[in-house]
Image (cartoon, grey):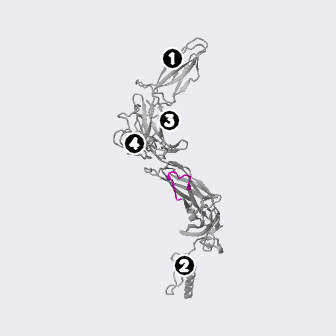
């Protein structure tokens, strides 16, 4: 009886051990029952694999993107769908992010709207649009799930696009040097670029484009004359300058189109590209500022330069400035202004010491590397024995305004010999210029420039009249008189114009001022005071009064 009970207890223990999920095996290596007590239960593995593809259930195709339309017209669109399923081909409900891309998308020839899609339903959709792609494009979808990279793919075929239009894109640079005059940053060639597009604006690849020039004067060349557009629809050619200054355009035509599809480039300029001396102009925003005793007054100094054909010099041409007094920006480089032409740049002049004594007249000099001017008597575009040059020598700051160089005045030393050379010096005897055949100077270039005078006006004024202090006006009649108005620096110097924008005003206690009673002082660098004329009219009664003038 006791043995039976023991066996029953043992059997009961074995049954309980098996039900508790202990070892999968109930038999030990020697046929001895295993002991499941005291250990950690081992769970049965769960299959958490996720697969990417199209469809679900029995229709699931692994590794495939579902494409709504595999064959697309140029510019067409298709929807792209991928599904994520578990081992039973059931859509999974976890959050998954998938990325769509293709070679054409990477090349800018196709677009996928919402190329990165996040789904919580197991299905993700994006839209593919061909915007220039042609032929087969393999689309790829990629996602990382549970640390595993999943991929699916599909191929769409895009029909070749029909040419819709030709667009001019660019000409770089737009200003090139005459043949044989390049160097120092000047190119003798320009790359001209067009783009072939379809009716939707997408690029057309592999179109044959033929180029031609509207003039070949001076030996202008075009290479190549025919190309095939690239994957982005671009087609380009190179212009090589000739020996004659001119404007030129390139015409591009798509071969085999009817009606003809083509376009013309913007105008390119072939020229020397450096300023000639008589095409340099310096100006100031205002030439007379209240700057004799006030620091920080400013005005712009603007230089405008053209070459000998009066075409703007190229953007980036450097100009150097010096000033006899105050402070000025040392350099600027030319640009093309939207409403102010090309070959323009500006620096700022600021009032401060030094202030030229005794009258505050400041000479500003702007200079750049250029060439002398000449009159082309035979119109061959080059200087030779029949032409007349304008010789200049090295530009200088004419501080005393006497028209000649005086020792101590700043100059631009082009040949760096330490002295100011005039037009007859060895380096400058003959014509200094790029387009020279005979009568040439040793140097092709030199400094060219222009100068202007700025007045540092005092704040107080000296006013005189031309009537000796009294005006006799008949009853009902009128009389004109002139006031001479200049600044007063208090040092006995010649009065200079008051600051531009100052107001000269007269008032009378008897009769009336007829016509203007005020004048605004203009911007002027006149070396002396300015005159302003007023008219006074008498009243009907004999009397006297006072005319008061103020600035």
Of the residues tagged 3 and 4, which is closer to the observer? 4
Q: Is residue 223 rendered magenta in the image?
A: yes
Of the numbered discs 2 and 3, the one sitting upstream in the chain is 2
- According to the picture, the residue beneath numbered tag 1 turns out to be 467
Q: How crowded is mark 2: few (under 14 residues within 10 Å), some or many (20 or more)?
A: many
- According to the picture, the residue beneath numbered tag 4 turns out to be 430
Of the residues tagged 3 and 1, which is closer to the observer? 1
Of the numbered discs 2 and 1, the one sitting upstream in the chain is 2
Q: Which of 296 and 168 is in front in this view?
A: 168
- According to the picture, the residue beneath numbered tag 3 turns out to be 285
Report whether 91 appears left or right of 371.
Answer: right
Expressed as whole percent of the image width and height from the top left, the position of residue 10 reads 55, 84
Tell me which corner region of the image, top left, top right, bottom left or bottom right, holds residue 514.
Answer: top right
Of the numbered discs 1 and 4, the one sitting upstream in the chain is 4
Query: Which secondary structure lies at badge 2?
Result: loop
Expressed as whole percent of the image width and height from the top left, the position of residue 277 reads 45, 40
């Amino acid at each position: 009886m006791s043995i039976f009970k023991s066996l029953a207890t043992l059997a009961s223990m074995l049954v309980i051990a098996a039900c508790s999920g202990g070892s999968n095996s109930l038999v030990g290596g020697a046929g001895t029952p295993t002991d499941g007590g005291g250990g950690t239960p081992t769970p049965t593995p769960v299959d958490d694999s996720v697969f990417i593809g199209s469809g679900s259930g029995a229709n699931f195709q692994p590794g495939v993107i579902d494409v709504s339309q595999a064959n697309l017209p140029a510019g067409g669109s298709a929807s792209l769908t991928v599904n994520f399923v578990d081992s039973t081909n059931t859509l999974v409900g976890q959050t998954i992010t998938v990325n769509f891309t293709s070679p054409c998308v990477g090349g800018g020839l196709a677009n996928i709207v919402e190329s990165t899609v996040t789904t919580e339903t197991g299905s993700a959709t994006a839209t593919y649009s061909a915007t220039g792609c042609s032929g087969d494009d393999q689309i790829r979808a990629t996602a990382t799930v549970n640390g595993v990279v999943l991929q699916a793919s599909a191929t769409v075929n895009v029909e070749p696009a029909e040419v819709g239009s030709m667009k001019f894109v660019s000409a770089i640079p737009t200003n090139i040097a005459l043949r044989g005059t390049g160097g120092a940053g000047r190119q003798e060639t320009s790359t001209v670029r067009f783009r072939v597009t379809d009716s939707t604006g997408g690029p057309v690849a592999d179109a044959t484009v033929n180029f031609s020039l509207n003039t070949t004067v001076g030996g202008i060349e075009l290479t190549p004359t025919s190309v095939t557009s690239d994957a982005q629809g671009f087609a380009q050619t190179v212009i090589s300058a000739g020996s004659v200054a001119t404007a030129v355009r390139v015409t591009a035509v798509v071969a085999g189109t009817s009606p003809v599809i083509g376009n013309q480039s913007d105008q390119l300029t072939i020229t020397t590209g450096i300023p000639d001396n008589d095409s340099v102009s310096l100006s100031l925003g205002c030439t007379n500022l209240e700057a004799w005793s006030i620091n920080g007054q400013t005005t712009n100094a603007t230089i405008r330069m053209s070459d000998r054909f009066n075409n703007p010099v190229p953007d980036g041409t450097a100009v150097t400035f010096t000033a006899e007094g105050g402070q000025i920006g040392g350099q600027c480089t030319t640009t093309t202004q939207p409403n102010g032409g090309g070959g323009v740049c500006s620096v700022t002049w600021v009032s401060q010491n030094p202030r030229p004594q005794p009258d505050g007249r400041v000479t500003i000099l702007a200079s750049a590397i250029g060439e002398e001017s000449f009159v082309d008597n035979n119109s061959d575009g080059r200087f030779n024995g029949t032409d007349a040059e304008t010789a200049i020598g090295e530009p200088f700051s004419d501080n005393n305004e006497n028209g000649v160089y005086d020792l101590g005045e700043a100059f631009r030393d082009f040949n760096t010999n330490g002295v100011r050379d005039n037009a007859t010096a060895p380096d400058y005897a003959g014509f200094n210029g790029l387009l020279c055949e005979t009568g040439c100077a040793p140097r092709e270039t030199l400094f060219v420039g222009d100068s202007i005078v700025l007045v540092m006006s005092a704040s107080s004024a000296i006013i005189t009249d031309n009537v000796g202090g009294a005006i006799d006006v008949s009853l009902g009649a009128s009389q004109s008189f002139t006031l001479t108005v200049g600044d007063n620096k208090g040092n006995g110097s010649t009065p200079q114009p008051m600051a531009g924008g100052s107001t000269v005003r007269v008032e009378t206690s008897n009769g009336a001022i007829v016509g203007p009673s005020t004048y605004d002082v203009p911007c002027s660098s006149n070396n002396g005071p300015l005159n302003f004329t007023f008219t006074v009219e008498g009243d009907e009664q004999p009397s006297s009064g006072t005319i008061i003038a103020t600035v």
